[in-house]
Image (spheres, rainbow, N blue to C red):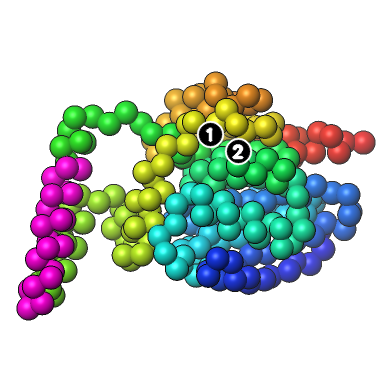
Amino acid sequence: MEGGDVLDMMIQGCPVYYEINRCSNDAAPVVLLLHGWGCDSTIFSCVAGSLGESATVMTLDFPGHGKSGEPPVPWGVQEYADMLKELLEQNQLLGVNVIAHSFGGRVGIMLASKYPNFVHKLLITGGAGIHAPVSARQCKRAKRFKIYNQFFNRLKTIRPLSPKVEKWQEMLRNRYGSPDYIRLNEMMRRTFVKVISEDLLPLLGEIKAPTLLLWGSADTETPLWMGEQMERNIPDAGLVVFEGKGHFAFLEEWQRFALIAKKFIMEEHAG
């Protein structure tokens, strides 16, 4: 692997930080690594180093993460995929091999289904994007939060009360919000809500790229049944399970993960 290019590009009003580590072999495949929510590209450091022996490796920090800027308006999965498509176009990269974790899986699904020419093969590990059934208790909790939050928004229009209401809303978010939601600023909270509200199940059947799904059997963030449902709905998909591993199975056994990823991506390049 040759030296890497560290770059920033303004895309859709947002500065995007990315790196390309080029393989000395011009015919080597290109691998694009997509990290999960709340992480950045460094989470793939070990995997990227291993893959870089035989592939050109591209990593990026999604807008709102790492060294990239925040989206100028709340983005959904489509906007993240559009950003990625433009980034690949600007770098003249077509038909890349995508390895995606968690939220990165959402973007990978959107990219592969909407812009199939850009994705040669797709590997998703602990991928998000399928909605779990919502219990009656969860519905009531969400409804309560919405009612309280709407009330506080009306109170904020009374200028003398505004500072106090901001504190009350923060307490409300801390009580009802997930840890990912709580630590975000207002723009990224709206982005987060928009992202997790999207159910990508209808897009799975549109994925044309050969797809490998790698899941930890003990994943509590994106349970194994999600990987199994993706396998059933993606036309050309296979599922590998790391027994006893969690949501970050690709880190818990990164060497094994890298070997599987190499075999999947490099099959047609062997010999």
Residue 115, compared with residue 227, is above or below; it is: below
Q: Secondary structure at mark 1?
A: helix
Q: Is residue 191 left or right of residue 208?
A: left
- Please name the predominant secondary structure of the magenta segment in the image: helix
Q: Is residue 161 left or right of residue 39?
A: left
| Residue at mark 2 | 113
- Which quadrant of the figure contains the N terminus? bottom right
Q: Which residues are magenta?
A: 142-161
Residue furthest out toward the bottom? 160
Task: Write the residue at 77% across / 58% down.
Answer: 92
With respect to residue 226, does 258 lie above or below? below
Observer able to see residue 219: no
Tell me, yes or no, if residue 203 can be seen here: yes
**How would you rate the neighbour count of disc 1 (Cα within 10 Å): few for under 14, some for 14-19, many for 20 or more?**
some
Q: Position of residue 14 (x, y in %)?
A: 53, 69
Query: Where 230 sits versus 265, above or below?
Result: above
Is 150 magenta? The answer is yes
Mark toward the start of the polypeptide (2 vs 1): 2
Q: Residue at x 45, y 68 (%)?
A: 72
Using the image as rendered, state which of residue 183 and residue 72 is in the foreground. Answer: 72
Q: Do the numbered discs 2 and 1 sit on residues whose CB atoms are within 8 Å?
A: yes
Element at badge 2? Answer: helix
Which quadrant holds residue 61? bottom right
Q: The C terminus is located in which quarter?
A: top right
Q: Which residue is mark 1?
A: 203
In the rendered structure, which amino acid carries the disc numbered 2?
Ser
Report the Cα–Cα distance between label 2 and label 1.
Answer: 6 Å
Q: Residue at x 13, y 70 (%)?
A: 157
The amino acid at mark 1 is Leu
Percent of width and height locating residue 71: 46, 65
What's the residue at 44%, 57% (across, down)?
Answer: 75
What percent of the width, then of the height, locates residue 238?
Answer: 63, 25
